[in-house]
Image (cartoon, rainbow, N blue to C red):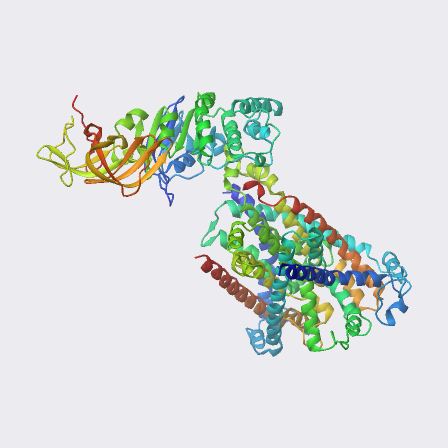
Amino acid sequence: MLTLENLSTSDPKVPLQSLSAHFEAGKIYTILGRTGAGKTELLRTLIGLDEISEGAVYLDGDDLLRTPIRARQMAMVYQQFINYPHLNVLDNVAFPLRRKGQGKAAARARAKEALALVGLGGFETRMPPELSGGQQQRVALARAIVKHARILLMDEPLANLDYKLREQLREEFPRLLHENAEGIILYSTTEPAEAMQLGNELIVMHEGRIVAQGDPGTLFDAPPTVDVARVISDPPISICAGEVTGGVLHFADGFLPGQADLILPPDGPVQIAIRPDALSIGGDIEARVSLAEFSGSDTIVHLNLPFGNAVMLVDGIHEFHNGDSLNVALDPNALMLFSQSGNNITERAD
Amino acid sequence: MLKPKHFFLLPALLTLAAIILFPLLFTVRVSFSSWDVYQAGLNYIGGKNYLRVFADGRFWESLMRLSSLSLITVTLQYVLGFALALAVWKEAKGQRIFRVLFLIPMMTTPVVMSVIWRTMLHESLGPTNDILSMIGIGPVPWLSSAAGAFISVIMVEVWQWTPFMFLLLLAGLVSLPKEPYLAAAIDGAGPWRTFWQVTFPLMAPVSIGAVIIRLIEASKIMDTVYVLTSGGPGTATETPSYYIYIRGLRDFQVGYSAALSLTYLVLMIITLTIIAKLLMRFLVGKEA
Amino acid sequence: MRRTYQTAKYLCLLGWSTFVVFPFLWALSTSFKDANAVTSGATYIPWLEFEPSTKGWQSLFSSGSQGINIVTPFINSAMVTLIASVISLILGTLAAYGLSRYQFRAGFVKNSDITFFFISQRIMPPIVLAIPFFLMLKEIGALDTIAGLVLVYIALLLPIAVWVMIDFFGSIPPELDEMAMIDGCTPIGAFFRVILPNSVAGIVVAGMFCLIFGWNDFFFAFILTFTKTQLLPVAIVSLNSSVTPWWSLSAFALISVTPLALVAVVVERFMSRGSLAGAFR
């Protein structure tokens, strides 16, 4: 079990601020956050590459901060393709085993197995610079897995690969990561879909802090704060100003979203969060299209609405032009409410 | 507390410091003495040597000479080196042979080549005047006239060190990105315009680096002058190094030459640092 | 327009090539001359304009009264240059790695200052150190010895090695060092096992410059040696000032410059086979 206690760094770009968390063996944790949220900083601090200013890290009781990097029994896969250019693929993967003291033959044998696992059987004598990006990353992955490290860290490993390769590897990951099942796996990413697909448990980071930790599905349905909601939503969630007046919920300019079975907070300003699937075509709200883009087999439409701006997700490919007028409907039961300070105060009456 | 990083840096740092700091400090001390052939030893005469340096016309003339020599040779080397690098850059017949050939002068020993050049520039027995006479140019007093000697030194220096510029500039050209050239070609720019608008600006960092390095090395010129002209005729090609050598190791005015050396050193450090910083700023300004 | 550009280009190349090659051809031709061929004016082509003789070449290898010994200075030059270059490369590479990967701080002195200290040594005119080196080597009895020269040459060549290698290490991503440490190497181990094997190109370039500046130095050898330990450049200059015939002089010169000319060919081949940081694109 990995424990972080009030971990802080004084990095000039993204300082970590008093992080505390528990990680258990045998689980895959995905760390989700925007660029600059501190994900890489966290991983590098755990490995020992960056210094901490305050706090402690314990792994199975060992004080990690007193352990030199080479003795921490960790493995890392970088975003850039990092392999040893002067060694062939087999020796690349065997490298950590040799450093641990294994004999050449034994290390190479296990390296060969790991390579077969990542689908690079037959590539043993090739040199890393000759390989494609996806192949290089597989080599890096094989080298990380073969160590059976206590902690396996992956810092946006698929970010530099093209879309198809990302999908492909993402599907293989559960099988691959099973090799390291006894360890703790931390996988950082900026894509919510990836985070939810891969992780047993989701950690959301924002501006150097951990702002949420828990089951991905639960966090998605009920993000604890506005920041979490923003990070976890793709396509983006829209936040509009609203107010509860006389027991009735309305948008800032008076627009009424319609009846919903929500238990409303006392009178006062609130933030109303509109999920992309809360809006649909056909209704009596007049909207104007400000931008339309395709994503996979869906269309994402940015709308100017009477009560603010929001993003709508439409199934299938539809053509919209900027400036088009559109009638849309808002499902009041798909709204979420957040307090002015950002906490989730949505309560459903059921 | 010895950390890994000290293992890397300290051996070199300590070695270098040990080898040069003592001599340097010693020179400083000597410069305040009047050690010469009559009176060997470290007495103390205050700043008298430095006052003498200040009034030493021959020294300051040699500095002026060095400045013009350096500027002329480095400019020529740059222009020629660039032209040659451009010529050999893309597909050219015999490209590799040219490349190796052009590197060779830089690898040769300056004094050795100067010895050969001396035989070549001999006014009656040397091939230079012989060939020139075939096209009707009278015997040129390469080494026996002030102007001729100056030009001879420049010629030999250019012969010797243009390869250095050539090497650095070619390495720079080879690693330029292709995109701007495609854009220029699409815009229909001819080779002249492409050079000035694309190649030259892109090569600015490499150019500046090469010029700075060459200026530093050129400011120390001694070997060529020693063999080719012995600083002459008269003092026509006398550089500061040569003059200090005469004062220190021929006249054995050790104390005075120490003061000259240090003045020379300080002037060089200040001048070259200023030039380097100016060029760097120019570079950064361009990118901004 | 393109045609004129092409012809201008080749004229340029051929013109410069002639300028480059001429001194060597002249020396080669002269080395086979004797008194007749030299004193009646400039002559060029053997057999056509003069009778070639091997007097010049022979005199190099005999050490009799007419002889000029080239073998001893050659060996001396080789020893001093190689030893000083190797030591400078080792120390310089280590220092450059330290400066490129770690932060140093001693009071207000930081990395860039230390780097400047190394590189600024090249600004130092040899004359400034020549006399104190002379006096100091005299003190420790190292004048006119190989060891004394090696010491001085290290001060000359170390900055070059540091300069080249700092630049080179800058092109190797530090993530590679990190990966080595994560995989179980100590920081020093990471350097030797991973970074060094990938630095061969840089070391070759640094080594080439060390060899060039070491082999070709005249001034320090001139000031700090006399009879026991003579280096090649000094030998030829002392020949030049005495009544040495042109043919011996030319032969001597050609042998002096051949080793590095060969190095040029080797390095050109090495460099055109693979560029320095190609592996890290």
Residue A289 location, quadrant = top left
Taking the image as shown, residue C32 lies to the left or right of residue A173, namely right
Outermost residue, left side: A246
Q: Nearer the viewer, residue A265 or A9?
A: A265
| Residue C69 x, y percent position in the rendering | 84, 58
Asked whether residue B251 appears in the rendered view, the answer is: no
Taking the image as shown, residue B271 lies to the left or right of residue A228, namely right
| Residue C52 x, y percent position in the rendering | 90, 61
Is residue B172 positioned above or below B24 on the image? above
| Residue B181 x, y percent position in the rendering | 54, 53
| Residue C218 x, y percent position in the rendering | 71, 61
Asked whether residue C77 appears in the rendered view, the answer is: yes
Say how many tags the image has: 0
Residue A113 location, quadrant = top right
Taking the image as shown, residue A169 lies to the left or right of residue C58, namely left
Is residue B81 positioned above or below B13 on the image? below
Q: Nearer the viewer, residue A272 or C103?
A: A272
Position of the C terminus of chain B by quadrant? bottom left
Is residue B168 positioned above or below A289 on the image? below
Q: Nearer the viewer, residue C77 or B35?
A: C77
Is residue A290 positioned above or below C257 on the image? above
